[in-house]
Amino acid sequence: MAVQNSNPVIEQQARLLAADNRQAEPDIIRVFWFPADHEVRLVELIDQVPQSLDGELHPFYFRPSAQDNLPAPTAIAMIRVNEFGRLTLPADWGDWSDAVEL
Protein backbone atom coordinates (compact mmCIF):
# COMPACT_ATOMS: atom_id res chain seq x y z
CA MET A 1 0.00 0.00 0.00
CA ALA A 2 1.49 3.33 -1.10
CA VAL A 3 1.57 6.32 1.21
CA GLN A 4 -0.41 9.30 -0.12
CA ASN A 5 1.67 12.22 -1.39
CA SER A 6 4.97 10.34 -1.11
CA ASN A 7 7.72 10.20 -3.72
CA PRO A 8 7.33 6.68 -5.22
CA VAL A 9 11.10 6.27 -5.77
CA ILE A 10 11.83 7.14 -2.14
CA GLU A 11 9.02 4.92 -0.88
CA GLN A 12 10.24 1.97 -2.97
CA GLN A 13 13.77 2.41 -1.62
CA ALA A 14 12.48 2.69 1.96
CA ARG A 15 10.52 -0.55 1.62
CA LEU A 16 13.49 -2.34 0.01
CA LEU A 17 15.85 -1.24 2.79
CA ALA A 18 13.38 -2.13 5.53
CA ALA A 19 12.99 -5.65 4.11
CA ASP A 20 16.73 -6.12 3.56
CA ASN A 21 17.58 -4.86 7.04
CA ARG A 22 15.02 -7.16 8.66
CA GLN A 23 16.49 -10.11 6.78
CA ALA A 24 20.04 -9.17 7.80
CA GLU A 25 19.08 -8.42 11.42
CA PRO A 26 16.22 -10.63 12.64
CA ASP A 27 16.17 -8.87 16.05
CA ILE A 28 14.61 -5.76 14.46
CA ILE A 29 11.14 -5.56 15.99
CA ARG A 30 9.57 -2.78 13.89
CA VAL A 31 10.65 -0.37 11.14
CA PHE A 32 9.25 3.13 10.64
CA TRP A 33 9.68 5.43 7.67
CA PHE A 34 9.46 9.21 7.83
CA PRO A 35 8.36 10.21 4.29
CA ALA A 36 10.43 12.91 2.60
CA ASP A 37 10.86 13.84 -1.06
CA HIS A 38 14.67 13.87 -1.14
CA GLU A 39 15.91 11.06 1.15
CA VAL A 40 14.90 7.84 2.85
CA ARG A 41 14.49 8.19 6.64
CA LEU A 42 14.15 4.98 8.63
CA VAL A 43 13.96 4.26 12.34
CA GLU A 44 14.44 0.62 13.30
CA LEU A 45 13.38 -0.63 16.73
CA ILE A 46 15.77 -3.15 18.22
CA ASP A 47 16.59 -3.64 21.87
CA GLN A 48 20.15 -4.82 21.20
CA VAL A 49 21.47 -1.24 20.88
CA PRO A 50 22.54 1.18 23.60
CA GLN A 51 19.99 3.65 24.89
CA SER A 52 20.35 7.29 23.79
CA LEU A 53 22.38 9.29 26.29
CA ASP A 54 21.14 12.71 25.19
CA GLY A 55 17.48 12.07 24.31
CA GLU A 56 18.05 12.69 20.59
CA LEU A 57 17.76 10.48 17.52
CA HIS A 58 21.12 10.13 15.76
CA PRO A 59 20.73 8.57 12.30
CA PHE A 60 23.58 7.26 10.21
CA TYR A 61 23.65 8.80 6.72
CA PHE A 62 24.48 6.92 3.52
CA ARG A 63 25.08 8.28 0.04
CA PRO A 64 22.99 7.17 -2.93
CA SER A 65 24.22 4.04 -4.68
CA ALA A 66 22.66 3.67 -8.12
CA GLN A 67 24.42 0.35 -8.77
CA ASP A 68 22.67 -1.06 -5.64
CA ASN A 69 19.25 0.28 -6.71
CA LEU A 70 19.47 3.00 -4.01
CA PRO A 71 19.03 6.26 -5.96
CA ALA A 72 18.42 8.49 -2.92
CA PRO A 73 20.49 9.25 0.18
CA THR A 74 19.45 7.31 3.26
CA ALA A 75 19.30 8.05 6.99
CA ILE A 76 18.85 5.10 9.35
CA ALA A 77 18.64 5.12 13.13
CA MET A 78 18.42 2.09 15.39
CA ILE A 79 16.78 2.72 18.75
CA ARG A 80 15.36 0.77 21.64
CA VAL A 81 11.61 0.06 21.62
CA ASN A 82 11.00 2.23 24.70
CA GLU A 83 12.60 5.24 22.96
CA PHE A 84 10.05 5.35 20.15
CA GLY A 85 8.14 8.63 20.34
CA ARG A 86 10.38 9.94 23.11
CA LEU A 87 13.59 10.97 21.37
CA THR A 88 13.97 14.36 19.71
CA LEU A 89 13.97 13.91 15.94
CA PRO A 90 16.29 15.80 13.55
CA ALA A 91 14.84 19.24 12.83
CA ASP A 92 13.48 18.53 9.33
CA TRP A 93 11.97 15.08 10.05
CA GLY A 94 8.63 16.30 11.36
CA ASP A 95 7.31 14.55 14.45
CA TRP A 96 6.66 10.99 15.57
CA SER A 97 3.08 11.07 14.27
CA ASP A 98 4.54 11.29 10.72
CA ALA A 99 6.10 7.82 11.05
CA VAL A 100 4.73 5.11 8.75
CA GLU A 101 5.28 1.52 9.81
CA LEU A 102 6.77 -0.64 7.08
Image: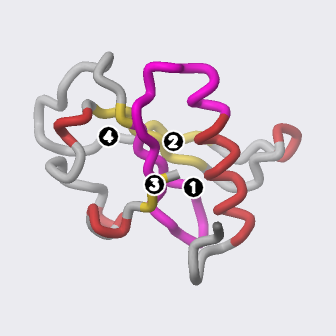
1 and 2 marks in contact (CB < 8 Å): no
Residue 78 lies left or right of residue 83; in this view the side is right
Give the mark toward the camera: 3 or 1: 3
Report x, y in % for residue 41: 49, 53
Task: Tell me the kind of residue under disc 3.
Answer: Glu
* Element assignment for label 4: loop
Within 10 Å of the Cα at label 1, are there few (<14), some (14-19), or many (20+) other Cα atoms?
A: many
Q: How many marks?
A: 4
23 in relation to 99, above or below:
above
Residue 68 lies left or right of residue 84; in this view the side is right
Task: Tell me the kind of residue under disc 1.
Answer: Val
| Residue at mark 4 | 58
Q: Residue at x 77, y 42 (%)?
A: 65
Disc 1/disc 2 C-alpha distance (Å):
10 Å
* Occupied quadrant, residue 5: bottom right
Q: Which residues are magenta?
A: 20-44
Mark 3 or mark 2: whose residue is earlier in sequence: 2
Q: Residue furthest bottom?
A: 5
Mark 3 or mark 1: whose residue is earlier in sequence: 1
4 and 3 marks in contact (CB < 8 Å): no
| Residue at mark 2 | 61
